[in-house]
Image (cartoon, rainbow, N blue to C red):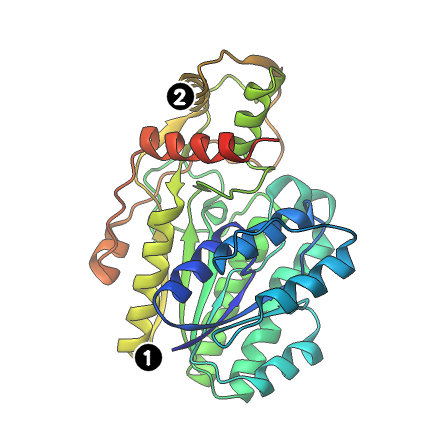
Amino acid sequence: MHYLVTGGSGFIGSHLVEHLLKNGHSVINIDNFDDFYDYKIKVKNTLESVGIGQEFKFSNKSHDIQKLIFETSRKKYQLYYQDIRDKNGLEKIFQKHKIDQVIHLAALAGVRPSIERPLEYEEVNVKGTMNLWELCREFKINKFICASSSSVYGERKTIPFAETDSVDHPISPYAATKKCVEILGHVYHHLYKIDIIQLRFFTVYGPRQRPDLAIHKFTKLIFENKKIPFYGDGSTSRDYTYIDDIIDGIMKSIHYLETHDDVYEIVNLGENEVIELEEMVSILESHLEKKSAKKILPVQPGDVPKTNADITKAKTLLGYNPSTKFQNGTKKFVEWFLRNAD
């Protein structure tokens, strides 16, 4: 099969690309190597995802990405340095390749930055996604998986969070863009018969995790004997989901779309295991065999107090069955971090 993956050089995307290639599929990766964090991380992700372990000699971003495109170009993999806001640029890619299904993971991520840059988040997350749907409509591609987020649930007090819960009260621009995309997805399904699964990811972690996310950030700071930013009293909690379980959920969603028609579904992908901030730090300390120093800070605007996925639908519809407990997943992450520590 021929898959187009947006954001295929990011954390989740690079793992998905790696999995698809290992299973003999063809992959078109669209990524704009956004400056949200160091582009060199995405270069390394890309090399690992296509099975190239060589040492990459960096010079400057433009040169490095062109070099990366050349070095990774092969029969079953093609990388495009492309912004999803640019519909004309996307159209050239759609014209050039046979595409059986789109897995759309690209987005401007992060709750807190979205409060500072809401218009940019709307442009990338909403307009960029609509550009892809418009091209799917034009090129008769009717299978589409889209990354949503647990942040759409906002400050719900009732847990676990189910797909049937109201999500009309997001508390950050990021969450609002994800909710908007879910609504617009139903429009494209209804009008143009594009089969869509919207996957609400719950706090994904594991090797290659973005350095701005808590587990990676805290691991690095504890390792370096620096203070960690500790928001609130430590009682905030997350449904942390290991990357291998997320990839399994995406692959099962791909299969479901390939074997079913007239599909529009919203599905939680979580671990259904809630870990408080205080416990998360304690577990990382045990893996690193170091104690942390905390800088106590107030709870940040836009952050939800708790996430907890009801994964009944994912299990029933897709056969999803997450198997990585937090203790084991964080151990694998810390081992990866230590291997890659400068």
Quadrant in the rendering for residue 128: bottom right
Residue 283: numbered disc: 2
Q: Is residue 278 above or below residue 41?
A: above
Q: Is residue 267 above or below residue 194?
A: above
Q: Residues within 10 Å of mark 2 (few under 14, many from 20)?
A: some
Residue at 46% x, 26% y is: 236
The label nearer to you, 2 versus 1, is: 2
**Extreme-front residue of the structure:** 54
User: Three-letter amino acid code at disc 1?
Assistant: Asp
Residue at 59% x, 72% y is: 130
Q: Residues within 10 Å of mark 1 (few under 14, many from 20)?
A: some
Q: Nearer the viewer, residue 257 or 149?
A: 257
Residue 213, horizontal then vertical, whole percent? 55, 37
Quadrant assignment for the C terminus: top right
Q: Nearer the viewer, residue 297 or 77?
A: 77
User: Three-letter amino acid code at disc 2?
Assistant: Ile
Residue designated by label 1? 262
Residue 252, horizontal then vertical, whole percent? 30, 62
Q: Is residue 118 visible?
A: yes
Q: Is residue 127 visible?
A: no
